[in-house]
């Protein structure tokens, strides 16, 4: 059974890059440029969320979304990889209980390793 990866990223150039990276991954990959809201995330039932910290035009940051997911018993075990170019991404990820983090610009090998680690 294919695993479902939800990528929430507001930068369309990064989305295009990630589409190429995950094209042959064997996973179902869903992309969103916006905060989908908790209800929609529950409907999608992703196996992993790759979540940007800054989401332009969203009422919540990626770290706020992560905090809410991790504090909800229904989604607390859902792996969240927080992504950002922020210098303090490790602190941000720790404060919102993300499972791990990736600094931008992405190291593609590390990105694939982290995603596959959580999806296997």
Image: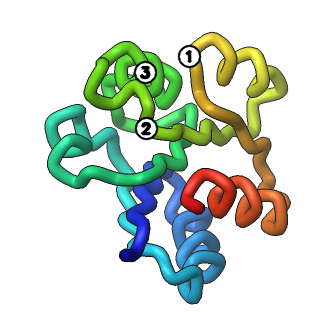
Pinpoint residue 56: horizontal percent, then vertical percent. 44, 38
Q: Which residue is mark 3?
A: 70
Spatial distance from mark 1 to mark 3, Cα to Cα?
Answer: 8 Å
Q: Residue at x 56, y 16 (%)?
A: 96
Give SS at disc 1: loop
Q: Where residue 96 is drawn, which disc sits there?
A: 1
Depth check: 46 or 107 in front?
46
Picture quarter containing residue 2? Answer: bottom left
Q: Residue furthest bottom?
A: 24
Could you tell whether 92 is left or right of 49 in the image? right
Pinpoint residue 61: horizontal percent, then vertical percent. 46, 26
Q: Residue at x 47, y 50 (%)?
A: 48
The reply to whether discs 1 and 3 touch (Cβ–Cβ < 8 Å) is yes
Q: Residue at x 30, y 18 (%)?
A: 72
Give SS at disc 3: helix
Q: Which residue is mark 2?
A: 78
* Dot 2 alpha-carbon crowd within 10 angstroms: few under 14, some 14 to 19, many 20 or more: some
Could you tell whether 36 is left or right of 97 in the image? left
- Sequence-wise first label, 2 or 3: 3
Picture quarter containing residue 13? Answer: bottom right
Pinpoint residue 116: horizontal percent, then vertical percent. 65, 63
Spatial distance from mark 1 to mark 2, Cα to Cα?
Answer: 13 Å
- Sequence-wise first label, 1 or 3: 3
Give SS at disc 2: loop
């Amino acid at each position: 059974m294919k695993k479902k990866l939800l990528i929430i990223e507001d930068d369309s150039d990064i989305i295009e890059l990630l589409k190429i990276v995950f094209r042959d991954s064997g996973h179902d990959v869903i992309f969103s440029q916006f905060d989908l809201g908790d209800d929609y995330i529950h409907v999608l039932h992703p196996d992993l969320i790759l979540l940007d910290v800054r989401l332009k035009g969203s009422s919540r940051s990626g770290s706020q979304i992560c905090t809410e997911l991790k504090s909800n018993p229904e989604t607390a075990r859902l792996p969240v990889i927080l992504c950002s170019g922020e210098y303090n991404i490790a602190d941000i990820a720790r404060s919102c209980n993300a499972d791990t983090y990736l600094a931008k610009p992405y190291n593609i090998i590390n990105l694939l390793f982290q995603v596959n680690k959580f999806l296997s």
